[in-house]
Image (cartoon, rainbow, N blue to C red):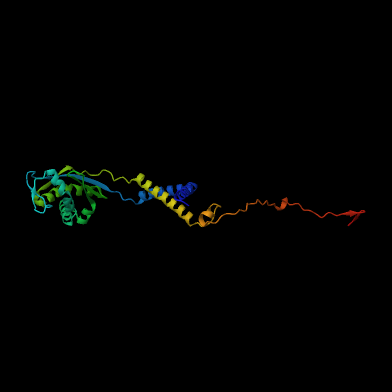
Amino acid sequence: MNIDANVQKIITLLIKKWKTIVIFTLLGAILAYFYTANFTTLTYVSTVEFLAYAVDSDQELSDSTTAAQQTSNTSKMNYAMKMMDTYIELFQTNKFNQSVADELNENLNTNYSASLIKGAVTIASVSDTALFKITVTTTDADLSYQIAHQLETSIPEAMEDANQGLVNASVEDAALKATASESLGYTRKCLIGAAVGFFLAAAYLILRDLLDVRIKNPDELPDRYNIPVLGSIPEFEIKSYSSHEKTDKKPRKEQKNGKEK
């Protein structure tokens, strides 16, 4: 059997068992909705966006990639963009996050840890720009805002202290307190659940068909075993009768010359 025939067979099988596929698909969507409604933790997000810039555009900045350690005049934008990955790694260190936690604990009389700050913060640079965005996600709207607001001060200070202060950062979009939790994403998660249900149903039907070694029609015998079909026995319809439909036949009595025989 060639590939086209196999594909056609699978498509025919799935169409024939469409009810099973629909049931699995709906079940997957329902389970995804139930899980989202009952087990998804609500989160709150605050973001801060910064612009990195070189302090002095006329200053000669060392280019460490050349063997001779020559210097080159690099524009503020290009140099800031070049240093973005370095600063992002700096903001993910335990030392930096501990300093943020210490500032928060001192200002708010709290007891936050560096691991809490590090786990809540996501840093991403904006492609082909010197902008980078800090996203703070926690289960508390106040906490997300407090961390984001503290980073508005901590990040420029850290950048000024690093690399001899050649690159600084300014706040371009200040943090705002979240007024609502992040969307639970019912539509997206239900679609994912439905897709999973569909593929599970298709896989189950295909595997069951592949593992079924029974011969269902005369065409399968030569295809599977290369054995020709010489003939087939037709099905005969056998009519059965109930007891009340049967007639009782009594033996006839023959008479001869008026006498019973």
What is the residue that sits farthest to the top in this orientation? 172
Q: Is residue 207 left or right of residue 175?
A: right
Residue 175: x percent and y percent? Answer: 20, 44
Instruction: Point out the residue furthest to the right here.
Output: 257
- Residue 180, x across and y down, in percent: 28, 44
Q: Quadrant of residue 257?
A: bottom right
Indicate the position of residue 124 as horizontal and vertical percent values: 21, 48
Left or right, residue 239 beside residue 193:
right
Which residue corresponds to the image point at 23% horizontal and 46% vertical from the top-left?
A: 46
Residue 169 visible in the shown view: no
Q: Is residue 47 visible?
A: yes
In this orientation, which residue lies closer to the viewer: 203 or 260?
203
Q: Residue at x 20, y 49 (%)?
A: 147
Direction from residue 101 to residue 182 in the image, left or right: right
Viewport quadrant of the C terminus: bottom right
Question: In the image, residue 162 lies at what x, y percent?
Answer: 11, 52
Q: Nearer the viewer, residue 230 or 62?
A: 230
Give the number of callouts. Answer: 0
